[in-house]
Image (cartoon, helix red, strand yellow):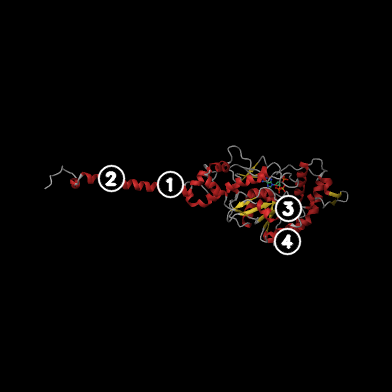
Amino acid sequence: MAPPGPAGAHPNSAEPLSRRIFRKFLLMLCSLLTSLYVFYCLVERGQTLSGPIVGLSGGGEEAGDPDRGVLAGGPRELAVWPAATHRKRLLQLQQRRRRRQQQQRRPAAPRDDSDQTVWEEETPGLVVGPGGSGAGSSVAEAPPGTLALLLDEGSKQLPQAIIIGVKKGGTRALLEFLRVHPDVRAVGAEPHFFDRSYDKGLAWYRELMPRTLDGQITMEKTPSYFVTREAPARISAMSKDTKLIVVVRDPVTRAISDYTQTLSKRPDIPSFESLTFRNRSAGLIDTSWSAIQIGIYAKHLEHWLRHFPLGQMLFVSGERLIRDPAGELGRVQDFLGLKRIITDKHFYFNKTKGFPCLKKAEGSSKPHCLGKTKGRTHPDIDPGVVQRLRDFYRPFNLKFYQMTGQDFGWDG
Ligand SMILES: Nc1ncnc2c1ncn2[C@@H]1O[C@H](COP(=O)(O)OS(=O)(=O)O)[C@@H](OP(=O)(O)O)[C@H]1O
């Protein structure tokens, strides 16, 4: 018979000491293994959802940007939007790579009839200081393997949509605003392929394009296409499905804007009034002057409609693009089959500039207005000459309204 134990002692207290120690050891081992497993799972989850992204972004500009549904809050949002976040980061990396390529390709002697000279100044984040933008500094922190993998993603495509005009219509503003959309990738400079460089071939043209991922649209803008006779047939030969966007503006203001640009580069040119007329006393307009000729929209449109159905063209009002950029961007996103991501939350009116600006430009967290060559002060033009031009354009404008089914309101 075993000796009685102390009062209240456990019935198993008779168990040998070594066995009790072994049981305790087993228990501790189990808890240790469980903790290790839980810890491992947490680390795994963290890496899948945010590891490379957080590592690359170093904090990320997306935080608190509910518009894109990316990184709006904590782990729950990460769990919901990992693909979108990854994609956004890819975009930033690709953008940096594109900037490097564009800087290498910078045109040696820009022509004076386009905004090629200023696109760089107007392309947000191109000049990256020592600290770099959010995207810039993040690239430097990326593990080399990850970076190489990310930079190799996507491929260059011919554009599926082109802003074909019109010069001084507001084409740069439209492109810069559209680039905010995560599914739009656009070349910054004007390629001038279908008017000046067609002989270089489509492979050359494609090489100018940024890389895109599945579902992203490649775009470019060259406003002179709208008035280039060969452009409709050439674009149609590239793809009959190309979507065409035309930003139009009151042709009289457009002509003055065009003249103002030329004047800024060649201050010694004759006055607007004298260039307008072939014979001033007879009131005969000089339609061979490009500043006047470009504004006869109905005539140019006729050429396009021989190659493209009207439904494949979108006419954006340059005036509304200034008054209500989000409204016009809504129409453009619908036309391109894009989710309406760019909304009024993306814009603010900059009183100093006198134009709407972006709260955050593509790949940047800073506000961005277009450069000083956009929104120039126009010279005062003789009101009689302005009236004569209004009379000249009226029938063409009415024809253009009929053709497009849109009244742009330039004639009262
Ligand atoms: N948000 C914003 N900021 C600045 N400027 C704006 C904006 N939206 C439209 N615009 C108008 O765009 C006009 C220039 O048109 P483009 O970009 O098509 O010019 S260009 O053909 O590419 O040279 C430019 O013409 P000017 O005012 O004559 O300089 C502007 O009126």
Give percent across and percent down for residue 111. Answer: 75, 46
**Who is closer to the viewer here, 105 or 272?**
105
**What residue is pinned by disc 1?**
43
Tell whether label 3 touches label 1 (CB within 8 Å): no
**What residue is pinned by disc 2?**
25
Q: Nearer the viewer, mark 1 or mark 4?
A: 1
Dot 2 or dot 4, earlier in sequence: 2
Work out how far the residue at label 2 is from the one at label 4, CA to CA, in angstroms.
85 Å
Work out how far the residue at label 3 is from the one at label 2, CA to CA, in angstroms.
79 Å
Q: Which mark is residue 305?
A: 4
Work out how far the residue at label 4 is from the one at label 3, CA to CA, in angstroms.
23 Å
- Classify mark 4 as within 8 Å of ligand 1 or not, answering yes or no: no
Local secondary structure at mark 1: helix
Q: Judge whether residue 187 can be spotted in this image.
A: yes
Local secondary structure at mark 3: loop
Give percent across and percent down for residue 279. Answer: 87, 50
Q: Amino acid at mark 2?
A: Phe
Dot 1 or dot 3, earlier in sequence: 1
Q: Which mark is residue 197?
A: 3
Dot 3 or dot 2, earlier in sequence: 2
Give percent across and percent down for residue 192. Answer: 72, 51
Q: Amino acid at mark 1?
A: Val
Q: Nearer the viewer, mark 2 or mark 4?
A: 2
Dot 1 or dot 4, earlier in sequence: 1
